[in-house]
Image: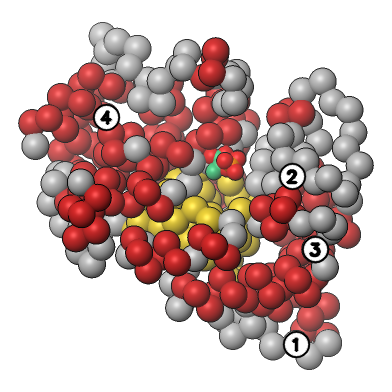
């Protein structure tokens, strides 16, 4: 199997019905970068910037951040990278930052909420990203956004840093895209507005499903109680894919489901064309898509999702579809 996947490294990820797919990596450390070469993935769909902060003994300086981001941009050699701004709080605690007591940390003061309430940290990070991106395209993504206003406020912070660097004569990135993670269910009901404003969106299905089903992603007792291929989650994912397409907004998915072949098959059927995943998933997902008729599986999923007689999940339907190939 491993050998078989390695042999696929240089095979273009195109479905049997001719649709080109972008397979990207989720990463967070310099040590992850050699996986680009090993897997043949096209860039990094999610760079988790908080990991540098989590492994450090003290708050990384702006120049330390800039150095890491530059190294990442150098390693991808022109391929896209999406840098997610700090997603700390919840289960991601920084030892050198005083944590506040919270009943429900996953629902608490975390990610963009900290970024907007204590903008010094976010500003320094955005500045590091913009400097690291000089002469390149750069994509900055905001995590745990729950309202349109949080996005526009985050974007204002970026705009302010851009103006500051310009004023001081710094070389700027060739393009600056600002995107949003879709991982709080409230955004499903503002998805049109978000797509109109953001340069791109990326589905964080780990959190989106955790919150959609009110089931702690770290708690095995409850994590198995819902199915990512159930009708509720597939309808949510369909809404995102359809609205992004209608709005002409770039969309990707970077949660764990993108790296599971059966789930990835459903995502391609729904219209997702960019999947970001752990390095070990690239081979299995590529093997799946090379054999896939994406239009055909899409038609099956859409028909089932609109049929009131459909049971709670499409898992067995999809597994049968995959078997027939
Ligand atoms: C997600 O929530 O799906 C995601 C990709 O981000 P993280 O797992 O870092 O929360
Ligand atoms: Mg998340």
Do the CB atoms of the residues marked 1 and 3 lie less than 8 Å apart?
no
Q: CA distance from mark 1 to mark 2?
A: 29 Å
Circle 4 packing at 10 Å, graded few (<14), some (14-19), many (20+), is: some
> Looking at mark 4, is its residue's CB closer than 8 Å to ligand 1?
no
Disc sitting over residue 302 in the figure: 4
Q: Earlier in the sequence, mark 2 or mark 4?
A: 2
Q: Is residue 195 above or below residue 321?
A: below
Dot 1: within a 10 Å radius of its alpha carbon, few (fewer than 14), some, or many (20 or more) residues? few
Marks 2 and 3 close (CB-CB < 8 Å): no
The nearer-to-camera label among 3 and 4 is 3
**Label located before the other in sequence (4 or 1):** 1
Cα gap from disc 2 to disc 4, whole angstroms: 37 Å
Q: Quick one: SS at disc 3?
A: loop
Closer mark to the observer between disc 1 and disc 2: 2
Q: Does residue 17 sit above or below 232 in this rendering?
A: below
Quadrant of res 30:
bottom right
- Where is residue 101 shown, x and y percent of the image? 89, 28
Name the N-terminal-most of marks 3 and 4. Answer: 3
């Amino acid at each position: 199997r491993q050998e078989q996947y390695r042999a696929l490294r240089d095979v273009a990820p195109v479905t049997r019905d001719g649709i080109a797919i972008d397979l990207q990596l989720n990463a967070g450390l310099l040590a992850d970068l050699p996986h680009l070469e090993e897997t043949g993935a096209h860039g990094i769909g999610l760079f988790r910037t908080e990991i540098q902060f989590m492994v450090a003994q003290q708050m990384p300086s702006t120049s330390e951040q800039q150095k890491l981001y530059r190294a990442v941009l150098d390693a991808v050699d022109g391929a896209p990278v999406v840098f997610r701004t700090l997603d700390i709080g919840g289960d991601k605690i920084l030892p050198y930052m005083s944590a506040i007591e919270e009943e429900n940390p996953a629902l608490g003061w975390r990610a963009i909420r900290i970024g907007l309430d204590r903008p010094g940290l976010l500003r320094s990070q955005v500045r590091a990203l913009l400097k690291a991106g000089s002469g390149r395209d750069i994509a900055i993504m905001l995590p745990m956004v729950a309202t349109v206003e949080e996005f526009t406020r985050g974007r204002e912070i970026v705009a302010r840093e851009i103006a500051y660097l310009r004023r001081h004569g710094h070389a700027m990135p060739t393009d600056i895209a600002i995107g949003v993670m879709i991982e709080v269910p409230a955004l499903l009901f503002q998805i049109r507005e978000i797509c109109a404003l953001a340069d791109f969106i990326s589905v964080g299905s780990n959190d989106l499903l955790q919150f959609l089903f009110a089931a702690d992603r770290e708690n095995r007792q409850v994590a198995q109680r819902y199915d990512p291929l159930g009708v509720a989650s597939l309808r949510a994912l369909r809404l995102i894919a359809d609205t992004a397409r209608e709005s002409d907004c770039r969309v990707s998915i970077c949660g764990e489901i993108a790296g599971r072949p059966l789930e990835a098959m459903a995502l391609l059927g729904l219209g997702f064309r960019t999947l970001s995943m752990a390095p070990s998933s690239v081979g299995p997902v590529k093997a799946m898509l090379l054999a896939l008729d994406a239009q055909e599986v899409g038609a099956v999923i859409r028909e089932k999702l609109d049929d009131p007689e459909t049971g709670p999940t499409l898992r067995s339907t999809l597994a049968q579809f995959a078997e027939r190939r």
